[in-house]
Amino acid sequence: MRIARFSIDGNVAFGAVEGDSPPGSTDGLVLDIIKGIPFGDFELSGTKVPLTSSDAKTRVRLLPPVLPNKVVAFGRNYAEHAKELGNEVPDAPFAFFKPSTSVIGPGDEIAYPSFSNELHHEAELAVVIGRMCREVPRERVKDVILGYTCANDVTARDVQKREKQWARAKGFDSSCPLGPWVETDLDPSDLTIQCTVNGQQRQLGRTSEMIHSVEDLIVNITEAMTLLPGDVILTGTPAGVGPLSVGDEVAVTIEGIGTLTNKVIKRG
Ligand code: MG
């Protein structure tokens, strides 16, 4: 099931996305509104709204598919990417945080920060946590995952190089686009992951190239901290990271999930 979070006529709800659409488009899709929230047991209401509508009253706007309490991101989890930035592949997974205020949704704008001259895209598979958990054993990892979505770990590369901690480089407002929805029925072990800028391919990899698997990462982080429903884990980016400029349209596509598209604007 694909679960989206959306607003319609001033109300916010979750919905199950039904139907088929051309790649990168939402034409032809409908949302079956979910009663309550999609953590734990939930029901579909049977009330359906089209995802694309010309009528302002029924116009749907997709929101970030979850509002995480925290986004835990893992670095250098693809060997080719570590190499392209001149870094060693780490022996153990290493994590950093992106704050909840960095999250934006599909179609939202990435605001180029004033303190950087080198903004980079990083296409990543995002894991969405479905239930409160800690010290999760490998065989229980599946039980704590709600599903998967696309992410862009937008990075001020120049700031990352000159500051020891990455809080500003990777945590500024709008640096964590998520979406377009959460796919709950997906094997994450070997999916195509791609990033395009203005339609031109920049990154292309497979999740099977990850050094540490989704299971490894969840075991690793829950040794240290409790994850809450809606928390998001970013699993690292394949090779091909590169610059974004004001006016660019950046799209992350993951096989079996969909496409997350955002435009870069000058911070106002
Ligand atoms: Mg990253």
Image (spheres, helix red, strand yellow):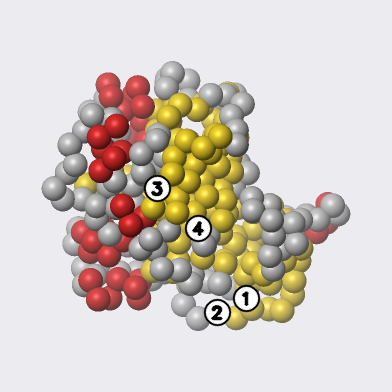
Q: Position of residue 36 (x, y in %)?
A: 58, 73
Q: Which residue is mark 4?
A: 255
Question: Which numbered circle lies on residue 205?
Answer: 3
Give the tally of numbered discs: 4
- How much space separates mark 3 and mark 2, taking CA atoms? 35 Å
* In the depicted structure, whether residue 120 falls above or below residue 203: above
Determine contact: label 2, label 4, CB under 8 Å.
no
Q: Residues within 10 Å of mark 2 (few under 14, many from 20)?
A: few
- Give the left or right position of residue 220, taking residue 119 as reference: left
Q: Residue furthest right?
A: 55
- The numbered mark, 4 or 3, whose residue comes first in the sequence reads 3
Task: Tell me if the residue at label 4 has its CB under 8 Å from ligand 1.
Answer: no
Q: Residues within 10 Å of mark 3 (few under 14, many from 20)?
A: many
Q: Which residue is mark 2?
A: 42
Q: Which residue is mark 1?
A: 35
The residue type indicated by label 2 comes to Phe
